[in-house]
Amino acid sequence: MGMPTIARIRLSLGMVQIAMNMLGEVDRGRKSPLSPAATEILYSAYFSRICMGDVAGMLGVSRSTATDHINHLEKEGYVRRVRSPDDRRAYYIAPTRKGEEWLLAIEGRLFAYLEEGMAQLTGEEQQEFARLCAKFTGVHDETSFSGVLQDLKRSRDRLHVPMTVVKEGRLLRLEEVADARYHADEEEQVKQMFEERIPETDDGIQDEMIVEFYEEMQKNLRDAGHLPLGGLLESGIRAGTALEIGPGPGYLGLEWLKATEETRLVGLEISQAMIASAEKNAAGYGLTARVRYQEGNALAMPFEDGVFDAVFSNGSLHEWESPERVFDEISRVLKVGGRFCITDLRRDLSPGIYRQMYDSCEPPEIRPGFESSVRAAYTREEIMDLLGRSHLTGWQVIAHPFGLVIHGKKA
């Protein structure tokens, strides 16, 4: 049996990683002139105007650490500070001539490496290789690059495959563990990829016992910090009155209210049992004055046109009987300039990610429901096709290892 596909890809990416280090001249026994964080700052400053105060959030570090990186870049002559013409107290970071020349020299070597490798492929193979790279990474243009990068930063701590294995007192070598893990039965892998979509219920979770299990699972996700609150806030949903479609027990919306000021929330839920659970949790948060839950179907929302500043939903898209009609309804009830953010599972999860997510479902009684939800979920291409046929505009679809994110601003 040949080398498993994932192991082959890891080996190829290992070569790319080494090549990038060599081309960046960090392999010659001397300290690189720029750290990875400093390099990200320089590249970001080259391609867009960034404020000093935004660097900490961009890197996911403290403000003092961000300032240290900026000071180092400035001391070495790679960047300079430029006072904002709009706010005399604000400064932007701009690359110097030295910084631009360093960046262009690195890019010259990287493009040469790509051209040399691509020269071994036919024109058709080059197009297919570019298409597969975009599908693998989720990066299709400059805009999606930024979104995928932020998603990766948020999810990297969750990316874990158990490769440290001890057998009979001996720590197994990496190639042994990889061989055992990825030489899986091909039929099992195909099953886990769920090529054919199988629709799930379209009337929500009504059974009280299942509601209880789902409530516990959502609470566990909240306590572990795995609800997509960060992405919601980063999409610009921070003010006004928002509509949450399919809030379930309500934890995401309640966390959003807690993280924002002077905001209000309306939860549209098809299951009366879930509404009761959400109302109980709202009382526990002390937020009953700022949230209202209403029974209804997203296919025909019981709201007037243009009444919400934002619409969001997490984990319910795969249950919508007609996503195209729901997208139309979202467009209808949103104000002009209103923002939306819809997150859900994706059906084309990798087998490894699927196993990881399945095994982490607690309580275990919820795992069959997770499997059926994955089977009912969509791929990025399917969602883009549905969005393209709807009235909703200004959208972008990002596929990350664990699911899909649809976000945008109504024009």
Image (tube, rainbow, N blue to C red):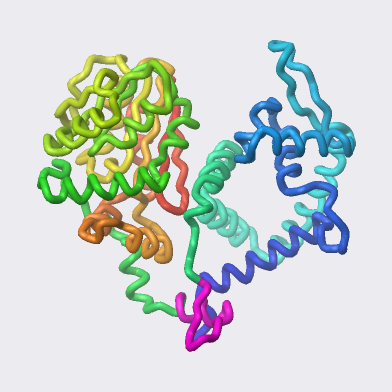
Query: Residue at the spot x=37%, y=23% of the render?
Result: 310
Over which residues does the magenta segment extend? 163-181
For residue 83, above or below residue 268: above
Q: Is residue 97 left or right of residue 371?
A: right
Residue 162 percent coordinates (x, y): 48, 69
For residue 406, above or below residue 158: above
Q: How many marks?
A: 0
Residue furthest bottom as drawn: 168
Quadrant of residue 21 in the image? bottom right
Query: Residue at the spot x=88%, y=33% of the render?
Result: 97
Q: Is residue 131 left or right of residue 232?
A: right
Q: Is residue 203 left or right of residue 121?
A: left
Pick the front one: 188 or 115: 188
Pick the front one: 242 or 329: 242
Query: Residue at the spot x=57%, y=68% of the render?
Result: 9
Q: Is residue 53 left or right of residue 345?
A: right
**Observer able to see residue 410:** no
Residue 168 percent coordinates (x, y): 48, 88
**Observer able to see residue 262:** yes
Query: Residue at the spot x=49%, y=57% of the render?
Result: 159
Quadrant of residue 305 in the image? top left
Residue 132 percent coordinates (x, y): 53, 57
Residue 384 percent coordinates (x, y): 39, 41
**On-image quarter of the C terminus:** top left
Magenta stretch encompasses residue 291? no
Pick the front one: 147 or 132: 147
Quadrant of residue 223 in the image? top left
Magenta stretch encompasses residue 173? yes
